[in-house]
Image (spheres, rainbow, N blue to C red):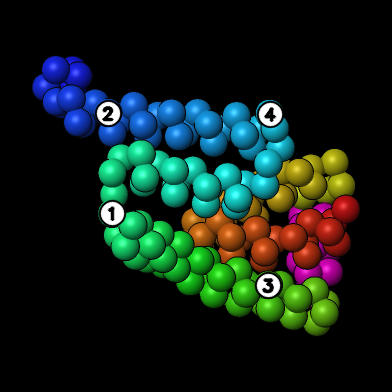
Amino acid sequence: MPVAMIGSHGAFLLLSALGAVIALVVLIAHFKVNPFVVLFSLSLVLALVTGMPAETIVKSFEAGVGNTLGHIAIVVGLGTMLGKMMAESGGADRIAHTLIRLFGEKNVPWAMVVVGFIVGLPVFFEVGFVLLVPIAFNIA
């Protein structure tokens, strides 16, 4: 949409969001500021700049962060437990040796690509990553 169709307030909101994204990238990549601190600070600044009421800012931030962390924490926590059980029980060793036997030592990276693809289709990235880390360590 052209800026004229958006309106002056809409253009201001878009430019504010763009400025926040640019500041986010610069602060994290160039100045090496902790990403959580940058996200927290910039979301607060962006809300204030756009004129959001203070009580709405707190409720909005609480709902957004709470929902995101609530889902991710459970997934990562349970995935970590499953990965640790797989490593301790010898399942990761068994999978690693089977992959090396099937693909050969020269094609181990391709074996990991295939396993990553198979594991990555039905699960979220976090779960797949946590499940594959013990296998990757055993193969290495």
Taking 74 as reference, is 20 above or below it? above
Q: Nearer the viewer, mark 1 or mark 4?
A: 1
Amino acid at the residue labelled 2: Phe
Whichever of labels 1 and 2 marks the residue nearer the N terminus, that label is 2
- Residue that label 3 marks: 80
From this viewpoint, is residue 13 visible?
A: yes
Whichever of labels 2 and 3 marks the residue nearer the N terminus, that label is 2
34 or 73, nearer to the observer: 34
> Is there a contact, CB below 8 Å, between mark 4 and mark 3?
no
Residue 94: percent from left, percent from top? 80, 70
Q: CA distance from mark 4 to mark 3?
A: 32 Å
Question: How many neighbours does mark 2 have within 10 angstroms: few (below 14), some (14-19), or many (20 or more)?
Answer: some
Taking 73 as reference, is 125 above or below it? above
Question: How many neighbours does mark 3 have within 10 angstroms: few (below 14), some (14-19), or many (20 or more)?
Answer: some
Identify the residue at horizontal 67%, vertical 64% (top origin). Answer: 130
> Is there a contact, CB below 8 Å, between mark 1 and mark 2?
no
- Residue that label 1 marks: 53
Q: CA distance from mark 1 to mark 2?
A: 17 Å
- Residue that label 4 marks: 30
Identify the residue at horizontal 80%, vertical 74% (top origin). Answer: 87
Whichever of labels 1 and 3 marks the residue nearer the N terminus, that label is 1
Whichever of labels 2 and 4 marks the residue nearer the N terminus, that label is 2
Q: Nearer the viewer, mark 2 or mark 3?
A: 2
Q: Quadrant of residue 129?
A: bottom right
- Residue that label 2 marks: 12
Residue 36: percent from left, percent from top? 60, 52
Magenta-tinted stretch: 91-102
Q: CA distance from mark 2 to mark 3?
A: 43 Å
Q: Is residue 82 left or right of residue 63?
A: right
